[in-house]
Amino acid sequence: MFKSRAENLRDFVDARYGLFIHYGLYSLLGRGEWTLNKELIDIDEYQRLANSFKAENFNADQICALAKASGMSYICLTTMHHDGFMLYDSDLSDFCTTKTACGRDFVAETIAAARKHGLRVHLYHSLNHWTCNPSSSAALETKEAYEKFIAFTFARIKELVTKYRPIDVLWYDGWWPFNAKGWMAEEMNKMVLEIQPWIIFNGRNCLPGDFTTPEGHMSAPNPWRPWEACLTLNDNWCYVKGDENWKSPSQVISMLLCAAKGNGNLLLGVGPEPDGSIPAKAEEIMLEVGNWIKSNREAVYNTEVFDMGLMERGEHRSDWSHVCEYTASGNNLYLTVKCWPGEELTITGLKTKPQKIYMLENGKELPFDYNPANGKLTLKGLPEQSPGLRPGFKVECSGRPEIYRCGGMHTPCVQHPPYDPCPSDLSI
């Protein structure tokens, strides 16, 4: 018996960090997953690319092993993007990997590898379909075309969740051109749940879903609900020639910490090269972040909402710093250093008394000074130079940690905004 939906959603909230794989015929062109649409390539010409799609170096076991070594807990694979090319064995279409040149089922391979390496399985599937007949565009134009298109959409989703189970998440995308009523989204989810009652959904069939998916930005929903920010490791979801604008390990760590302080997830997008291999630079960055997670895992996983408000204090318990980023869990406050300050590190406004402080990498206990009057905490005995990538510290407090500062040199004894007295365009 697989887990319940409630258990599945709890596991999702704790998952924190996953790998998003965009791979398909568009990878051969190297100009983006929307190339068929953006260049208006002849559909017959585009479909003939399947004769050249060999994916000789796509190794699901190596990809999942890399994800695990990188500190990730799940993988999400594009089973079919908007171009309609299916990376699995379909009885509904010949435009799939088992019936073309490579003769492989990448969904089955990825699920088997993910389970082997202890990763959750999330499957991406596009509702939009550019190459079926009638297409999504045609479905807008006549009732007959709409009914055929929706019937085919339901058939392929049903086939996917019937052939491949159990899976943890069905990750819809490509909701153009309909709203929830047009997609028959309630009926769609009901059909899926009749086959796999434990599955959870994102909100991209125009229903709210079980979690939100901010794309390209790290924004926790307010009020909070489960969320997963999806961002790319370079500038594109799939392989694009010449895109070498890789995020640094430090940038990825900051994204992870942002997810952690908002009790959300980071889904990091990496596009395999045309032959299916993970770009060497992507692997290097992922492994460096993974090594950091080994020493600093508790600052990222099993954390709780620890954020700040600019205009109102409300239930916010955190603040911002030039030097470090804050996360929290229970009575523990975590400081992850962005810019190494030297032999001492100081924060102010800590309202909860610190009891002990440790360096996460080696467990060494550190001396400190604390002034309860202004919450000034100074960690002492640090090396002059940073000991490595984004060092982290654990501050054991007497209760749930709370930090409060404001825009003035002392905290006024009357009601006041923390930083902004009126709405602003600042992002925190």
Image (tube, helix red, strand yellow):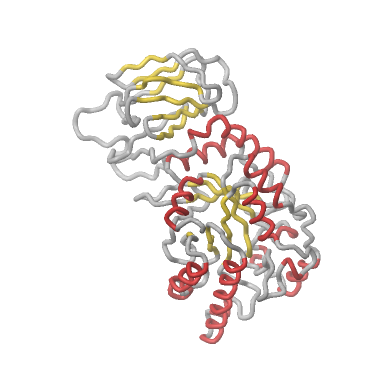
316 vs 31, left or right, is left
Residue that appears at 74% across and 50% down: 277
Give x and y (percent) for residue 233.
Answer: 61, 45
Residue that appears at 41% across and 62% down: 208
Q: Is 224 located above or below residue 407 in the figure?
A: below
Q: Is the C terminus in the top left, top right, bottom left or bottom right quadrant? A: top left
Give x and y (percent) for residue 22.
Answer: 64, 56
263 vs 87, left or right, is left
Q: Work out whether residue 116 or residue 149 is closer to the camera in this orientation and state it.
A: 116
Going by the picture, which residue comes out furthest to the front? Answer: 1
378 vs 48, left or right, is left
Residue that appears at 53% across and 81% down: 146
Going by the picture, which residue comes out furthest to the bottom? Answer: 144
The answer to which quarter of the image holds residue 333 is: top left
Q: Work out whether residue 53 or residue 88 is closer to the camera in this orientation and state it.
A: 88
Give x and y (percent) for residue 340.
Answer: 53, 22
Q: Is 145 located above or below residue 45 in the figure?
A: below
Give x and y (percent) for residue 168.
Answer: 53, 57
Q: Is 247 located above or below residue 78 in the figure?
A: above
